[in-house]
Amino acid sequence: MLSLKNFNLQLGEQSLIQNLSFDIQKGEVLSIMGPSGIGKSSLLHYLSGTLDHALSAQGEVLLDNKTLHDLGPQERQVGLLQQSPLLFPHMSILENLLFAIPHHHHKKTRHQKAQHALEKLGIPDKANVLPEALSGGQQARVALLRTLLAEPNCLLLDEPFSKLDPALRREVREFVLNEIRQANIPALLVTHDPEDAKAMQGQCIELS
């Protein structure tokens, strides 16, 4: 379970978010909605340990009863999926996937995991192509599975559907929700779109 208690976010003297608390169970997605500039993405950066130094924030973060807010980003085991897929453009799809898989796995196991991901994506024939050869929807799916292959204990989603056309958006939302449930980890989505929140089939908090 991912828990946030009494979160406050400020930009100088300006208060952006006050006293936000929530719990997210494994396999569930909590959606947070609100206008631009209110601090939704900054909340995700706080949870991942990458908050901009121009902002100040306080709040207790617990993941499976382990305190996170005092740890560095690499120690948190938090996955972050952003608006753009951010695949490495000079690496093949297979190399992008392999890059994410922890090195404590044997080399053969890492390749098996990456190959399985390609099959799940329906693009086993695209293993050696560069990301630019894929459609936007395919890139979004690859980015999600690459994030999950890193074995995070929770997933943060920063408007990952915003650049997709409506039909593709529905497909990718469904894919994302299914993968989160299979991974059985808590996930937090921030979005402007009420349809995104509805598609995640979980609680929704609206910030104003």
Image (tube, helix red, strand yellow):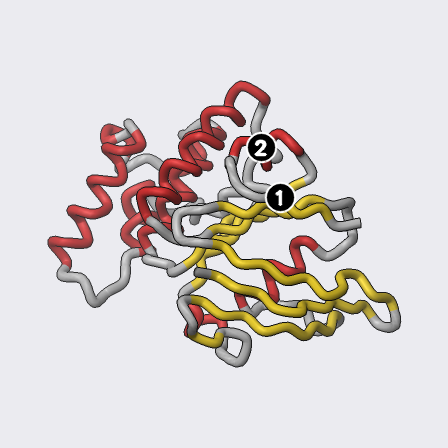
Q: Is residue 78 above or below residue 76?
A: above
Q: Badge 1 local density, few (<14 within 10 Å), some, or many (20+)?
A: some
- Residue 108, numbered circle: none
Identify the element where label 1 is drawn.
strand
Q: Is residue 112 above or below residue 60?
A: above
Q: Residue at x 34, y 49 (%)?
A: 184
Q: What amino acid is labelled 2 in the image?
A: Lys
Q: Which residue is outermost to the top?
A: 167
Q: Which residue is mark 1?
A: 204
Q: Position of residue 149 (x, y in %)?
A: 31, 52
If you read the primary sequence from the N terminus, does the residue marked by circle 2 or circle 1 appear first? Answer: 2
In this view, the residue in front, 178 or 169, is 178
Q: Is residue 8 visible?
A: yes
Q: Residue at x 81, y 68 (%)?
A: 11
Count the numbered circles shown: 2
Q: Which residue is mark 2?
A: 198
Say whether residue 53 is left or right of residue 136.
right
Q: Residue at x 36, y 44 (%)?
A: 145
Q: Position of residue 125 (x, y in %)?
A: 24, 28
Say whether residue 78 is left or right of residue 94.
right
Q: Residue at x 45, y 67 (%)?
A: 63
Q: Position of residue 8 (x, y in %)?
A: 72, 68
> How far apart in space, not on screen, are marks 2 and 1 (Cα)?
8 Å
In this view, the residue in front, 126 or 140, is 140
